[in-house]
Image: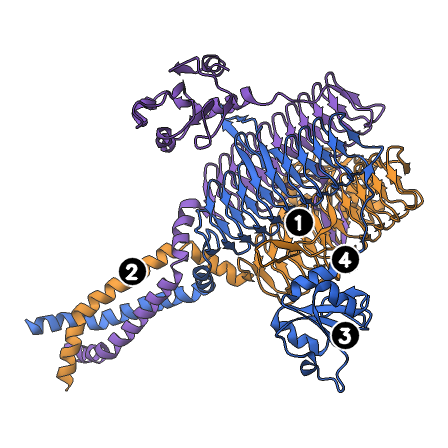
Chain colours: A purple, B orange, C blue
Amino acid sequence: MKLRELADRLACRLEGDGEIEIARVAGIEDAGPGDLTFVANTKYLAALATTRASAVLLRDEAPPTVLLRDEVPPAPLAVLRTPDPYLAFARAVGVFAPRWQPEPGVHAMSAIARDARIGEGVSIAAFVSVGEGAVVGDRTIVFPNVTIGPGARIGADCVVHSNVSIRERVIIGDRVVLQNGVVIGGDGYGFVRRSDGTHEKIPQVATVVIEDDVELGANTTVDRPAVGETRIKAGAKIDNLVQIAHGVVIGRNALMAAQVGIAGSTEIGDDVMFGGQVGVGGHLAIGRGVVAVGQSGITNSVDAGAMVAGYPAIDAREWRKASVLFRRLPELKRRVEELEARLAELARHSAPVARDGGKQSQ
Amino acid sequence: MKLRELADRLACRLEGDGEIEIARVAGIEDAGPGDLTFVANTKYLAALATTRASAVLLRDEAPPTVLLRDEVPPAPLAVLRTPDPYLAFARAVGVFAPRWQPEPGVHAMSAIARDARIGEGVSIAAFVSVGEGAVVGDRTIVFPNVTIGPGARIGADCVVHSNVSIRERVIIGDRVVLQNGVVIGGDGYGFVRRSDGTHEKIPQVATVVIEDDVELGANTTVDRPAVGETRIKAGAKIDNLVQIAHGVVIGRNALMAAQVGIAGSTEIGDDVMFGGQVGVGGHLAIGRGVVAVGQSGITNSVDAGAMVAGYPAIDAREWRKASVLFRRLPELKRRVEELEARLAELARHSAPVARDGGKQSQ
Amino acid sequence: MKLRELADRLACRLEGDGEIEIARVAGIEDAGPGDLTFVANTKYLAALATTRASAVLLRDEAPPTVLLRDEVPPAPLAVLRTPDPYLAFARAVGVFAPRWQPEPGVHAMSAIARDARIGEGVSIAAFVSVGEGAVVGDRTIVFPNVTIGPGARIGADCVVHSNVSIRERVIIGDRVVLQNGVVIGGDGYGFVRRSDGTHEKIPQVATVVIEDDVELGANTTVDRPAVGETRIKAGAKIDNLVQIAHGVVIGRNALMAAQVGIAGSTEIGDDVMFGGQVGVGGHLAIGRGVVAVGQSGITNSVDAGAMVAGYPAIDAREWRKASVLFRRLPELKRRVEELEARLAELARHSAPVARDGGKQSQ
């Protein structure tokens, strides 16, 4: 594709030769001739001096690339100006992406209940099971080996990758993407201890609601509760191997990296960002926009806007300061020992004086 | 259902109007008219003042609800008295649960080996594979896309949710529940380093035994060992995304929350309770009834009855005290610096005196 | 099998009765008559005094077993001498392993695209889906309910266990073992925040390369990136429930225990060893041979050969020293308080003297 056409499609302002052929999008270090790359973070501007890319997406206010390139004469590095190079990059990836997707239609080797409702333009692959009364919305794509339970409702334009389990009566909105192996509506972990030490299962029969535009990563699990509901609100994006326990609410546009675990009945506010392997205890309230550093263990409710780290999680700046000192604990201990020794020494010498002094001043 | 009938079915003593119609079970804050709720923890008794539920499960010795409600006249909140409101709640959920379950029978699109033995009243869904010589016990339900390997034996009254993998020769007891995506009998992680730095696989050909009444959560994995066995004892309840390595023994009625990981050959005692994301090292012995706080990292064997926390895990009270001080490390360091400064100051002034004093006292 | 024959097959030197019948391989404590056991670590030599095994694999230089056994006369414990008893044990397990494997052939209830290429001697089980243009190499075994996406290429002699998802265009080498539930090529977690707070998906359309002799554990996930590639190099062995994010490179012969998570674009060197639940941040470089203790949280790049622990991860010895002091923080605080009290006391008494002394010296 000519760079000029790409500029049009990405709504960027072109600087340089619009006739360059662009065939691919690549990271700034891997890029070669024919590639479009991007610099979203000014600290990577220096890499423009050496990149072999043919064109670069740059913020409107970034300096002209000729100033950054020390070749004489500078190689022709065309620029596409945009207020948000990272967003333009995302879209450019889409422009060059292989445009593969399964044909609409229901595979002969699927098992669709007679009363299930399958929308227009739906693609259902081999070995997919759709239970009684389930609904699959228009244009939704269901890959092989997916099980959709009785009464489950899936919206329009969803993508359900292979080996996903959607359990009975789960409700899924529009444009939801479920990566492979996701489990939605598995029984919550709810048991009551009997007097003999065995555990009685609390039937987990309430449901799960996944709102519009949610994405769940591979092998992530979202449990159903006994009563009430588990809900993931619109636009939340959740990575692989994440555990969302029964009765949890995840706020709109929340981001959670891989292997996060949220215990039962906790409410997570809108716009939170959790790093990988964060754990959150049960029955807590995590306010809007809270940021939790990877591996944090959140044991108490957190106010909106806070940034937390550590285990138990505390204010991130406080945690960082304390962490730096953690590794210096042996030094701190030595200093305390030295103080003790010097004080003992001092006491040995000065104490008699002090006592004499006391007498002198009487 | 009339409250009177519900009281009978739950073996509770009725206080109030037995003619009330109950249609649902709900948490105390979500409950409305027609709902039964419960208070198992006295700290939630206050919520009775405002709940809109029609009836509540209460401990025998809890005060009459009229004393707790400030409406004039108090709304009619009937009470079901029971020694264990949480257990009665669990059973009440069951009373109102949708009574859906698959019909017995073997789906035409399943692949059952000729010599597999399928019990009475078994339900085998579409796209289920049962290997040579495998056994599925009476009334067990197998959902779609489950693979049962050759020689595996599954007991009676089990529920195997979709996309579960049960590998060759695995042995599963009665009334076992496997949530979706569980893997039992995957190869243990056993390799020997060769002199050239590559790793030779130790064939993992021994088996896994899951005893009666065990439940495993979604996408949990239980590995088989090279020799000996991996065993999960009767009544253990394990949450989602948990890793049980090869050769591990999990005790009776053990509870493990999501994302726990147990390394190879460790023995976990009966009645333990592990919070989420706990990790336990290999070749350890964790005693009966040990409690581990979420995210603990257990690196040594633990005596029966201990409660541990932290990483490396130590006595939980000790850990809590140390944790409080962790965040105060900057303050502690300041205090040490101040001591050093004051001592230096003191030494500067008093040391000569001390020496003078020494002379004086000669 | 006669011990003499086993000695031949394992290339060991026989000490004792070669006519003993060996039927099984077992751990030293579980072993009984007819079993072969092993001692690879000298600390288990003592167990030879009481083992009921019939024969033992021992290092060449280990003492004769008669010296270690206090029975009079000592039970006949034959010895197989070898430079590497653990490796010989691994191979002995293979000798006695059930030699079960599926027959070659393509199951009638599979869905193989017309233009997919299936090699010689391949076994494809029921409910396996192979997409357009996909390739499955010679003698590879594909268990039930596996989905192989369009354009994916799998090498020769691989084993793909049930419920694995191999996404479109993923490339897999020879002799790769994928345990059940593995997901390769799921979309990387890549989103751009729009100005309204919602997130735009960056199409994750580049690919994943799994080189020869890699093994991935049950329910492990390996994501594909938007550009570039995710690569797991030859001989890496990765345990269950591990997350490999988009754009990550894992070095040759790397070992990663269960539940490890590697964030996006990080490069992991050859021969690293990570304990369970280790987390590694994004865009880092972890050098060759780095060892990370279980649950470490690596937030910075690590030099080759380092051994790290803790969160944030630091040098493991340093961490161990600091950890010991962590639990003694209450004591350290008490000592600081005592110092403060004693210094205050001392100051109260000596300060006037110091001042007097100052005057005296004027």
Q: For mark 1, does the 10 Å Cα neighbourhood hold few (<14), some (14 to 19), or many (20 or more) residues?
A: many
Whichever of labels 1 and 2 marks the residue nearer the N terminus, that label is 1
Q: Are the residues under badges 1 and 4 in a single subunit?
A: yes
Residue placed most toward the observer, B198 or B57: B198
| Distance CA(mark 1)–CA(mark 3) | 35 Å
Q: Are the residues under badges 1 and 2 in a single subunit?
A: yes
Q: Residue B142 appears at what percent x and percent y?
A: 83, 41
Quadrant of the rendered image containing residue C85: bottom right
Q: Residue at x 39, y 23 (%)?
A: A58
| Numbered disc in front, either 1 or 3 | 3
Q: Residue C103 appears at what percent x and percent y?
A: 83, 43
| Distance CA(mark 3)–CA(mark 2) | 63 Å
Q: Residue C314 appears at what percent x and percent y?
A: 44, 55
Viewed as shown, does residue A277 lie left or right of B213? left
User: Helix, strand or loop at disc 1?
Assistant: loop
Disc 4 designates what residue?
A: B206
Question: Quick one: quadrant of the C terminus of chain C?
Answer: bottom left
Q: Are marks 1 and 4 in contact (CB under 8 Å)?
A: no
Whichever of labels 1 and 4 marks the residue nearer the N terminus, that label is 4
Residue type, mark 1 in image: Val
Residue type, mark 4 in image: Ala
Disc 3 designates what residue?
A: C52
Q: Residue at x 8, y 71 (%)?
A: C359
